[in-house]
Amino acid sequence: MFPSQDAILSTFASQHPLHQRKVQPKRPEAPAPANREVFPAWSVADDARRKANDFASEASREFGVASQMAQARTGHIEPWTPKYYAACTVGGILACGLTHTAVTPLDLIKCRGQVDPSLYKGNMDAFYKIRHAEGMRGVFTGWSPTFFGYSAQGAFKYGGYEFFKRFYSDLVGEEKANQWKTSLYLTASASAELIADVALCPFEAVKVRMQTTIPPDFRSTFSGISTVVSKEGSSGLYKGLYPLWGRQIPYTMMKFASFETIVEMIYTYLPGKKADYNKGVQTAVAFSGGYLAGILCAVVSHPADVMVSKLNANRQPGEAFGAAMGASIAISGSWGSGMACLSGL
């Protein structure tokens, strides 16, 4: 009727304080990994870095393929050959003509602000007022003379720069050219810009008048040129040439000299020579050098840029250059405490 002693012991003996159990020896634990990540399966930073590297590699590969295809069609271009100068000329047309045309709205706001600083409160205020009063077409007022003028200027600037760089190098000899290469860059760029501005000046005169008169005086670029010539003679197209030289020659000297120097400095910090890198890396280095050079150019050339806008808009036929400059810029005394020359920056 009652359970036996053996059954009771087998059931409750393990809970008795006097019962001794066999202690199993502990197994040694495996050492933990030295560097154990909290989330070893996925990392946002690593994933983004990997995708960026993959994208850069693919873009570089595609750029290299496109470059090889273009070279296969045109053939290898040897430096200092007619084909080389032609390529530089076409590159200058695209580099200057298209880029200046693309930023016509900013140029419009800048020119109107230089001629009449009280016209707008700021860039955004100017954009909204012009768009409201003249529509989107009004925002791009002056795009046509900008395209024609800066395309012509770019052709002479880039093609001429390479020509004069070679010309002056041969003139002084290879040893002195390497010793004074920065001076060589400055001289070559100034010579090229001196000629390029003669091609730009008529279009710049029409552009400024179109942008600074509301509504614009001219309906098109070449009708504007004809109107100016009929009223003022051909000299009316070149009345802003001196300040244009004052703006563009320092601008171009700074651009080419600083660009060449910055690119050389970048390659000195990279582990390899320029020829060791593909076209994608070389383009990125050139873009970085051009961006930094552009900032320096804007600072150097801006005071003369104000004179170009004011003289083309306000100078009367037959008025002397010095008198026109004094009347347009030195109204508040000399440089207006330095602010007149910086309007529109």
Image: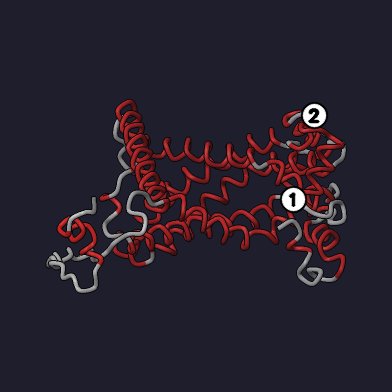
Q: Secondary structure at mark 2?
A: loop
Q: Residue at x 24, y 61 (%)?
A: 12
Q: Is residue 262 above or below residue 147?
A: below
In the rendered image, residue 19, in percent from the top left (x then y), is placed at 18, 70
In the rendered image, residue 111, in percent from the top left (x then y), is placed at 76, 49
User: Disc 2 vs disc 1: Cβ atoms closer than 8 Å?
Assistant: no
Residue tagged 1? 110
Which numbered disc, 2 or 1, marks the residue closer to the eye? 1
Q: Residue at x 37, y 49 (%)?
A: 42
Q: Residue furthest top?
A: 73
In what quadrant of the picture does the C terminus appear?
Answer: bottom right
Q: Secondary structure at mark 1?
A: helix
Q: Residue at x 42, y 63 (%)?
A: 182
Tell whether 114 sits left or right of 90.
right
Q: Nearer the viewer, residue 200 or 3?
A: 3
Tell whether 99 sits left or right of 343.
left
Under mark 2, the amino acid is: Arg
Under mark 1, the amino acid is: Lys
Tell whether 279 sits left or right of 322.
left
Q: Is residue 337 above or below residue 70?
A: below
Residue tagged 2? 219
